[in-house]
Image (cartoon, rainbow, N blue to C red):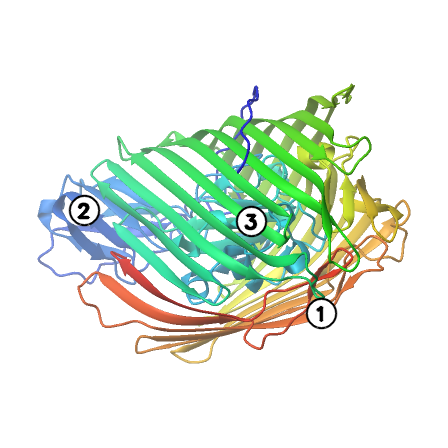
């Protein structure tokens, strides 16, 4: 049970929306082609994108008449005359919904690509599905790859993206929450993420430690996942050092519900649900995730102290939407997330209780404007044990209780300029945390520490995007300024108080991107950028222990800095898609754990800034339809991260910890007559576990299998699909952590479940 504590907060945070890399200004439009709709219809129009091309098969809904039609291949549509004067909602994959009033014949409806947006920790509208418009490496997982996968937790699903690395290869079903960080661009991983994770524009990165609670998001709720591999601080500010991972749920345009429930081996059971309903200007949505995972013993050579590592978790996230006009939207959302974990020994456990309330507003008037505000409280408790070498005994080494409070606000806009389109935004965020520690083994006995700290992050950006005089070229330029301050921090014991010095710093983050389409099937892109990540309060002030490795905090840490560029090509041929991107960048002051001393019973480390690192590599992706029912995906990343200079032991010649040279994944999906069969294979190269490169995690292979059958529809709008899933099909076991004792990956797991969907 987590012990509640009071804490005074001075804070505000959040972010907002604004289109950036995606989107082009409208080109001159010719008279729309005549639609193939029936002649009896008396109200005609055409749906176009911002470059003037028709949007085929867009859906036009008139809620008042309960009328729904689909545009033709030329973007044209026709409605009965009685629809005149009513409001219509127009949607298409990859575009933000448009709301218009049907007033006249020959109506031209413009759909904007779902906007790429954000600030220090939040964004708003969905990332564009039209990846060809982005000047950076991008990967997208659609419903076919998300909903026919054997894994039921989000971080395992992201293993299909070879460029993406999670810390220590473990997954959210059994890993300690503070180790669930993610990174891109070959910079290595740590407990704190070096990439920003967004759910419909709301950040999932923990404001205290930067890690991600992956179990907050049920995969059944997701419509798509987009991963951008590039320094993105120019638009997103802090936490976007190496890119962003944007999770998008189904748009709340149609009434719909999804449900996924089942269970299986290793004492597992789960239930996930997501949906939305709308009535006129009002609408509501709900996301639910509940699971119990009994787990397995992770120790490679278990003793009497070793027990199963597993989790019980629940997430409940309702929202209320109000659209007072066609051009405005107000959304109030809340979330409660709680989990209780068993970390592999009798004394090592942890628990989390998170509560969040957020308010978002959007207005399409003179430009597109957005504002947000939120409040979040997170109560986290964890225990750590000292384990004997023979693993037959353990003692409580550290007990911690962390209370974090964060609040914030932000605003941003996208507006027309004489030469292109302008972008602007501001954000303000403050976080306050109290870390209470009880260390019974330390001298004197029953030592009690209280680590307190506050962090303030402010940022603002300006941008411009435009098609160049040549119609095949588009340019995006961004410039952002951020400043942050750590203050009011101190360490208190029963006998003394040690204040930490207040510190402040700033960062300037420019970005420039170019996309050139020499022919319709080929896009060439290039970009350059600078980005940063300020050290979290967790890294500055909170020590922790994993097994017999004690990691100390460091209040003198500097921000991580990254400067890089990339160039690549995307080629589309019929339904096939191919892309290749070369990236090269240099980072300094990356935060990593440095070994201070080693004894048979304890390894002591401290978080420190490294010297200079160069990370470069090649990202390859392919989507190849092998027939009308068979699709093949391939994703490969080759990355070389070398240390150029740094303090011992990070001398030139040693490799960056937790960064394999090669990663890859392959996915085969067969779908016919209601059957769905998918087989995916993942490969990860060997990687160093520690700074001395003396502990090395071996390479691994993992295979997953999914088999589902959609039953004949028992009523018109619903679907029922029973399925069978197997993860780690061949039960390959490999080390995911060395502490220094080896901890193994999850063994083969079988599960069976039932999916139900309505209204899609």
Residue 249 in the image, given as x and y percentages of width and height: 40, 50
Side of 65 where 743 appears, left or right: right
Provide the residue designation for mark 3. 341
Provide the residue designation for mark 1. 699
Whole-angstrom CA distance, mark 1 to mark 3, is 28 Å
Q: Residue at x 27, y 52 (%)?
A: 256
Q: Secondary structure at mark 2?
A: strand
Provide the residue designation for mark 2. 62
Spot the residue most to the bottom. Answer: 627
Determine whether 421 is above or below 712 in the image. Answer: above
Residue 100 in the image, given as x and y percentages of width and height: 25, 40
Dot 3 surroundings within 10 Å: few (below 14), some, or many (20 or more)? many
Q: Quick one: quadrant of the C terminus?
A: bottom left
Whole-angstrom CA distance, mark 2 to mark 3, is 48 Å
Q: Residue at x 57, y 46 (%)?
A: 212
Dot 1 surroundings within 10 Å: few (below 14), some, or many (20 or more)? some
Is residue 153 at all visible to an observer of this figure? yes
Side of 537 where 41 appears, left or right: left
Is residue 509 at all visible to an observer of this figure? no
Quarter of the rendering containing residue 482: top right
The front one of 644 and 702 is 702
Residues marked 2 and 3 touching at CB (< 8 Å): no
Q: Report how many numbered discs are placed on residues in the image.
A: 3
Side of 517 where 610 appears, left or right: right
């Amino acid at each position: 049970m987590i012990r509640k504590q009071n804490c005074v907060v001075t804070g505000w945070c959040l972010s907002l929306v604004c289109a950036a890399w995606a989107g082009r200004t409208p080109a001159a439009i010719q008279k729309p082609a005549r639609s193939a709709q029936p002649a009896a219809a008396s109200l005609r129009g055409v749906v176009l994108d911002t470059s003037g091309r028709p949007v085929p098969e867009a859906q036009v809904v008139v809620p008042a008449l309960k009328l729904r039609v689909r545009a033709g291949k030329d973007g044209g549509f026709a409605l009965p005359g009685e629809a005149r004067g009513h409001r219509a909602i127009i949607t298409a994959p990859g575009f933000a919904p448009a709301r218009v009033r049907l007033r006249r014949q020959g109506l031209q409806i413009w759909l904007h690509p779902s906007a790429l947006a954000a600030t220090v920790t939040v964004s708003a509208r969905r990332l564009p599905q039209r990846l060809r418009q982005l000047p950076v490496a991008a990967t997208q997982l659609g419903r076919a790859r998300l909903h026919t996968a054997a894994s039921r937790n989000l971080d395992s699903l992201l293993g299909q993206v070879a460029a993406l690395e999670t810390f220590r290869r473990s997954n959210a079903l059994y890993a300690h929450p503070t180790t669930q960080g993610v990174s891109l661009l070959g910079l290595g991983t740590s407990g704190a993420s070096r990439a920003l994770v967004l759910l419909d524009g709301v950040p999932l990165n923990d404001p205290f430690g930067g890690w991600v609670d992956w179990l907050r998001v049920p995969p059944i709720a997701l419509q798509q996942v987009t991963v951008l591999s590039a320094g993105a601080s120019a638009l997103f500010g802090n936490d976007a050092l190496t890119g962003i991972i944007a999770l998008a749920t189904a748009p709340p345009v149609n009434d719909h519900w999804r449900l996924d429930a089942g269970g299986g081996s290793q004492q597992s059971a789960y239930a996930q649900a997501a949906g939305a309903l709308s009535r006129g200007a009002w609408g509501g949505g709900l996301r639910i995730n509940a699971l119990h995972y009994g787990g397995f013993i992770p120790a490679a050579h278990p003793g009497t102290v070793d027990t199963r590592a597993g989790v019980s978790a629940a997430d409940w996230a309702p929202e209320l939407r109000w659209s007072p006009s066609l051009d405005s939207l107000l959304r109030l959302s809340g979330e409660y997330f709680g989990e209780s974990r068993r970390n592999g020994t009798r004394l090592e456990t942890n628990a989390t209780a998170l509560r969040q309330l957020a308010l978002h507003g959007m207005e399409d008037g003179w430009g597109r404007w957005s504002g947000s505000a939120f409040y979040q409280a997170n109560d986290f408790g964890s225990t750590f044990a000292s384990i004997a070498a023979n693993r037959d005994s353990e003692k409580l080494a550290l007990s911690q209780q962390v209370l974090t409070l964060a609040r914030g606000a932000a605003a941003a806009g996208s507006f027309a300029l004489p030469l292109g389109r302008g972008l602007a935004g501001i954000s303000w965020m403050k976080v306050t945390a109290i870390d209470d520690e009880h260390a019974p083994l330390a001298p004197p006995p029953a030592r009690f520490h209280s680590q307190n700290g506050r962090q303030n992050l402010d940022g603002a950006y300006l941008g411009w995007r435009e098609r160049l005089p040549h119609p095949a070229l588009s340019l995006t330029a961004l410039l952002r300024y951020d400043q942050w301050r750590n203050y009011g921090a101190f360490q208190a014991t029963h006998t003394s108080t040690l204040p930490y010095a207040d510190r402040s710093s700033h960062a300037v983050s420019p970005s420039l991107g170019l996309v050139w389409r020499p022919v319709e099937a080929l896009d060439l892109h290039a970009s350059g950028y600078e980005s940063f990540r300020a050290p979290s309060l967790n890294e500055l002030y909170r020590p922790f222990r994993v097994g017999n490795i004690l990691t100390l905090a460091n209040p003198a840490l500097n921000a991580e800095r990254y400067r890089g560029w990339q160039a690549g090509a995307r080629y589309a041929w019929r339904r096939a898609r191919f892309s290749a991107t070369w990236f090269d960048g240099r980072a300094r002051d990356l935060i990593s754990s440095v070994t201070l001393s080693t004894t048979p019973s304890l390894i002591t480390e401290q978080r420190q800034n490294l010297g200079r690192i160069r990370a470069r590599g090649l990202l390859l992706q392919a989507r190849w339809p092998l027939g009308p029912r068979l699709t093949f995906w391939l994703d490969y990343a080759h990355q070389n991260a070398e240390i150029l200079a740094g303090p011992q032991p990070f001398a030139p010649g040693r490799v960056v910890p937790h960064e394999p040279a090669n990663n890859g994944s392959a996915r085969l999906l067969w779908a016919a007559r209601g059957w769905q069969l998918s087989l995916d294979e993942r490969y990860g190269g060997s990687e160093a576990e520690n700074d001395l490169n003396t502990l090395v995690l071996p390479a691994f292979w993992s295979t997953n299998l999914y088999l589902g059958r959609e039953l004949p529809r028992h009523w018109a709008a619903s679907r029922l699909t029973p399925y069978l899933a197997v993860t780690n099909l061949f039960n390959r076991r490999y080390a995911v952590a060395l502490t220094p004792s080896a901890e193994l990956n999850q063994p083969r797991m079988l599960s069976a479940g039932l999916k139900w969907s309505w209204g899609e």
